[in-house]
Amino acid sequence: MIIDIVTIFPNFFNEFLETSIVKRAIAKESVTINIHDLREYSNNKHKQIDDTPYGGGVGMVMTFPPFYELITKLKQPFSKVIFLTPQGNVFNQNQAVDLSKEKHLILLCGHYEGVDARVLELVDYEISIGDYVLTGGEIPAMILSDAIVRLLPGVIMEESHQSDSLSNDRLKYPQYTKPEEYKGYIVPEVLVSGHHGNIEKYRELMAIKTTMEKRPDLIEKTPLTEKEVKILEENK
Ligand code: ADE
């Protein structure tokens, strides 16, 4: 996969590209992430990329030509162009899975009061990372890239995707590691029993219970399956 990120703050991404799983995915060539400085596509001699809004009003608006030049240079017939904006659909794990199957993503980071609306005519999806307003689209672009890159084949063990929190609208079961006891805080007995069947059942039960307790909205969205109801009944 190729991810092209369009930003006026290219340095913002330095640590992101050099850290942890994203760094490893780049080294393994599972993904190429290119950072493009939008200012370089300004035809203004001061490299200005914003201007006052037509019709008046407060703040500045990012201009159309630099976006047009850069997008038309990068875009292939199969590319998906995404604009990060609080006005978009709120990003979720299902969308991360869908986008991880694409070949080429172009992520546009906005700033100021917004972008010239003609940019949206070149965009496939408007995506928000949540109902709050950030100073720019850089952190949202990192969030999308991170969520997508870890799903690419070979980046992390595939089994971990199936047990990811939020896959199938269920949270993950609680996990523990050594020591078995610390200052009276203990690991549930079943997990140290070595009985794989019971451990599996415990995890299924806890995934359902944790979701019901912490995210009842997910149960409403994807109701309990027959199997889940049976597991709950067996453990009343
Ligand atoms: N830019 C500013 N706020 C944002 C948000 N919540 N999601 C995506 N892009 C943004």
Image (cartoon, rainbow, N blue to C red):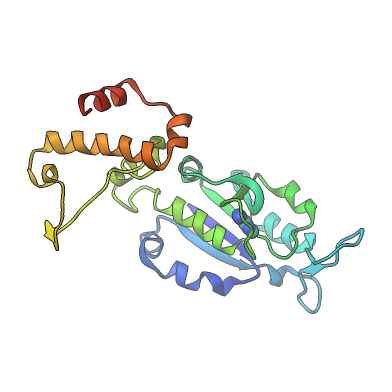
Q: Height in image: 137 above or below 174?
A: below
Tell me if 193 is positioned left or right of 91 in this view. Answer: left
Quarter of the image where one finds residue 34: bottom right
Q: Height in image: 191 above or below 10?
A: above
Quadrant occupied by the C terminus: top left
Q: Seen from this angle, which residue lies furthest right?
A: 55
- Residue 206 spot, x, y in % from top left: 27, 39
Residue visible at 48% across and 45% down in the picture? 96
Residue visible at 63% across and 66% down in the picture? 7
Residue 220 visible in the snapshot: yes
Q: Which residue is nearer to you in this view: 233 or 138?
A: 233
Q: Seen from this angle, which residue lies furthest bottom?
A: 46
Q: Quadrant of ligand 1?
A: bottom right
Residue 179 visible in the snapshot: no
- Residue 44 spot, x, y in % from top left: 81, 74
Tell me if 104 is positioned left or right of 172 in this view. Answer: right
- Residue 210 spot, x, y in % from top left: 33, 41
- Residue 205 spot, x, y in % from top left: 25, 34
Quarter of the image where one finds residue 115: bottom right
Q: Height in image: 8 above or below 96?
A: below
Q: How many marks?
A: 0
Quarter of the image where one finds residue 207: top left
Tell me if 184 is positioned left or right of 71 in this view. Answer: left
Residue visible at 56% across and 74% down in the picture? 11
Q: Seen from this angle, which residue lies furthest top?
A: 226
Q: Which residue is nearer to you in this view: 207 or 101?
A: 207
Residue visible at 51% across and 47% down in the picture? 103
